[in-house]
Image: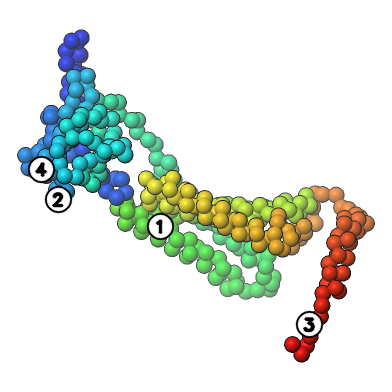
């Protein structure tokens, strides 16, 4: 039972934890502080001992205030320190937040204390059991989409062997892709979340497969050939989002930088793609469908051939101009 604090009585001293952070921002070493003041440095006499040659014997002092807060005082040293991007001044106390990151002589630290309320626990984004429950279903859907694509493009009399390689190949590539990202996570965060990365890539590939099947059907059903231009836009966006999704798991503290890099590459790639289509005179894709679905999927009303001829009349003047331009061009001398 907590002791009641009466008016005029000093608040009980908080308990703090000093964490030594790694490159990924995760704690590598944790030291508990229960007595105040607490010195931080290389000396064994310090309450918080950090073995780094750039730290002074006594580099800084943690202390608590009568108001119940925690403050840090930097001692005179060669390499100093910084907090919240600003350099600390020696012998000048600064307040320490409930979970405060700081750097002392290039050593990244985090100070957590009980003077402020502890943040509530966060639920898992996807429970571990659900990972393995979702994976077989998404893998089966991916195989089904690959089989439909293969079935629609090969001879009906083809052997089953002609279907096996295209079906198994993508699964091997997907497993290898997830394993590489899991190895990167193991390198930087010391864990191997293969199921997490596999779920991400399967989810995006299933979305791309469904999109590649649904868009042509909708375009054919309603006679909207320009709708296929969405595929050229959405597929790169999904691919870039997948890379960012993987990378944010490996480097969670660099999500903003990773997002900016992915968006920049997407804008550059889509701009080059738009420039190439501009040269082909169809920025939003050709005004026709390259393949036709069965007539049963057609929902738009049929149009007579005369409407097609009328829609082509605006091209007559442009074609005549191009023909005259070609006729007026000087012929090359074969002797040159």
Quadrant containing the C terminus in the rendered view: bottom right
Quadrant containing the N terminus in the rendered view: top left
Eye-nearest disc, 3 or 1: 3
Disc 2 to disc 3, C-alpha distance: 78 Å
Q: Which of these two is toward me, 201 or 237?
A: 237
Disc 2 to disc 1, C-alpha distance: 34 Å
> In the current view of this chain or complex, which residue is farthest to the right?
306
Residue that appears at 22% across and 40% down? 81
Eye-nearest disc, 2 or 3: 3
Q: Which of these two is toward me, 150 or 5?
A: 5
> In the current view of this chain or complex, which residue is farthest to the top?
7
Q: Identify the element where label 2 is drawn.
A: loop
Decide: is 335 above or below 277. Answer: below
Tell which circle, 2 or 3, labels the residue nearer the N-terminal end.
Answer: 2
Mark 3 lies on residue = 332
Disc 4 to disc 1, C-alpha distance: 41 Å
- In percent of width and height, residue 2 lies at 20, 18
Residue that appears at 52% across and 52% down? 264
Q: Identify the element where label 4 is drawn.
A: loop
Mark 1 lies on residue = 181
Residue that appears at 18% across and 25% down? 64
Mark 4 lies on residue = 57
């Amino acid at each position: 039972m907590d002791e009641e604090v009466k008016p005029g009585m000093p608040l009980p001293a908080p308990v703090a934890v000093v964490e030594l952070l790694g490159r990924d921002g995760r704690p590598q070493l944790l030291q508990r502080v229960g007595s105040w003041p607490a010195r931080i440095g290389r000396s064994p006499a310090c309450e918080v001992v950090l073995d780094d040659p750039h730290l002074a014997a006594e580099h800084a002092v943690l202390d608590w205030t009568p108001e119940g807060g925690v403050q840090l005082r930097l001692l005179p040293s060669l390499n100093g320190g910084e907090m919240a991007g600003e350099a600390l001044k020696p012998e000048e106390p600064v307040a320490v937040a409930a979970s405060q990151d700081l750097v002392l002589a290039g050593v990244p630290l985090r100070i957590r204390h009980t003077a402020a309320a502890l943040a509530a626990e966060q639920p898992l984004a996807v429970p571990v059991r659900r990972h393995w429950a979702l994976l077989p279903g998404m893998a089966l859907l991916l195989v089904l989409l690959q089989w439909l694509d293969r079935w629609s493009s090969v001879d009906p009399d083809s052997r089953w062997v002609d279907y096996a390689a295209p079906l198994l190949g993508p699964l091997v590539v997907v497993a290898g892709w997830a394993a590489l990202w899991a190895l990167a996570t193991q390198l930087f965060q010391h864990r191997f979340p293969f199921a997490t990365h596999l779920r991400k890539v399967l989810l995006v590939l299933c979305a791309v497969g469904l999109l590649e099947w649904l868009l042509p059907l909708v375009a054919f059903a309603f006679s909207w050939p320009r709708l296929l231009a969405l595929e050229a836009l959405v597929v790169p966006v999904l691919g870039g989002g997948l890379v960012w999704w993987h990378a944010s798991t490996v480097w969670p503290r660099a999500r903003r930088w990773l997002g900016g890099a992915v968006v920049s590459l997407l804008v550059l790639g889509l701009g080059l793609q738009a420039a190439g289509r501009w040269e082909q005179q169809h920025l939003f894709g050709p005004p026709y469908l390259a393949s036709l679905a069965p007539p049963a999927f057609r929902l738009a009303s049929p149009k007579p051939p005369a409407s097609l001829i009328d829609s082509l009349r605006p091209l007559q003047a442009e074609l005549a101009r191009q023909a005259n331009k070609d006729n007026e061009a000087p012929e090359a001398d074969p002797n040159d």
